[in-house]
Image (cartoon, rainbow, N blue to C red):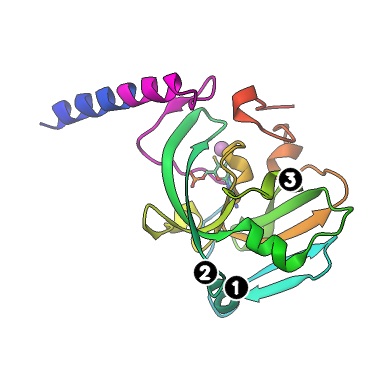
Amino acid sequence: MALDRYLKGDDDRRVLERKMKAEGRLPPGQALTLKWPVLHAGAVPEFDPQTWDFRAGGLVETPIDLSWAAFSALPRTDVTSDFHCVTRWSRFDNRWSGVAFREILARVRPKAEARYVMVLGHVGETRYGYQTNVPLADLDRPDVLLATHHDGVPLEPDHGYPLRLVVPHLYAWKSAKWVRGLIFMAEDKAGYWEKAGYHMYGDPFLEQRFS
Ligand SMILES: Nc1nc2c(c(=O)[nH]1)N[C@H]1C(S)=C(S)[C@@H](COP(=O)(O)O)O[C@H]1N2
Ligand SMILES: [Mo]
């Protein structure tokens, strides 16, 4: 019966939530979700593999502009990680696959002055309409991924197809969907939600929700 399933589902959810809390994996003020909510500004963009590109520039030795074919030829890796949205849901053990952020760093070679990155993604058809700032050190980690797949299948359009950033240790607004570029910067600068009052860093375990 539908109602039984619903109750059983909620029971599973609570059991898992207690487990994650006991293991120190549930940040304060968060609830575990077994579903995967969708959250973004604007419409879901169209993907055209002929015109799509991924650019990285600013304070780097070698700016890049990769076509979809070139991006797809980069070495791939898998990462299992947790995902914490500032609207108070957390989704655990997501199996992402894609290109390690460090593959990009190895190609662009950030200059010594580069300390922050503005990550650029779509708002609707505007390819750099979404921006979010992350310290370079927080992207230079083995679990930071430019993901094409989740739990073994290509990302749904709603979740960022064809490519999204995943920064597991910061609130999920830093994990830009439909990502198209990076600007390496010397100073920190507020992005889309940060300008609206979201925290410049966004550590979920410190509840850095708003500035
Ligand atoms: N391009 C873009 N990426 C974005 C957003 C957005 O509005 N635009 N929202 C962020 C927020 S607030 C969250 S919680 C996550 C949600 O990812 P999901 O919809 O796959 O759960 O995407 C992030 N990435
Ligand atoms: Mo979010």
Report, in whole angstroms, how far the alpha carbon at label 3 lies from the one at label 2: 30 Å
Crowding at label 3, few (<14), some or many (≥20) Cα neighbours within 10 Å? few
Q: Earlier in the sequence, mark 3 or mark 2?
A: 2
Does the beta carbon at disc 2 come under 8 Å from ligand 1?
A: no
Residue 137 bears which disc, if any? 3
Image marks 3 and 2: residues in contact by CB distance under 8 Å = no
Q: Is residue 4 left or right of residue 51?
A: left
Report, in whole angstroms, how far the alpha carbon at label 2 lies from the one at label 1: 7 Å
**Residue 154 horizontal/vertical position (percent):** 41, 61
Q: Can residue 135 be seen in this view?
A: no
Above or below: residue 103 compared with residue 158: below
Residue 157 bears which disc, if any? none
Q: In terms of secondary structure, where does tag 3 sit?
A: helix
Above or below: residue 188 compared with residue 26: below
Which residues fall within the magenta stretch? 15-41
Q: Which residue is drawn at 65% across and 58% down?
A: 102
| Amino acid type for the residue under numbered disc 1 | Trp
Q: Is residue 151 left or right of residue 191?
A: left
The quadrant where ligand 2 appears is: top right
Q: Which of marks 2 and 1 is nearer the N terminus?
A: 2
Q: Residue at x 63, y 44 (%)?
A: 174
Q: Mark 1 points at which residue?
A: 52
**Residue 165 horizontal/vertical position (percent):** 58, 53
Of tags 3 and 2, the one toward the viewer is 3
Q: Name the residue under label 2.
A: 47
| Amino acid type for the residue under numbered disc 3 | Ala
Report, in whole angstroms, how far the alpha carbon at label 3 lies from the one at label 1: 27 Å
Residue 1, quarter of the rendered image: top left
Q: In terms of secondary structure, where does tag 1 sit?
A: loop
Does the beta carbon at disc 3 come under 8 Å from ligand 1?
A: no
Above or below: residue 171 compared with residue 10: below
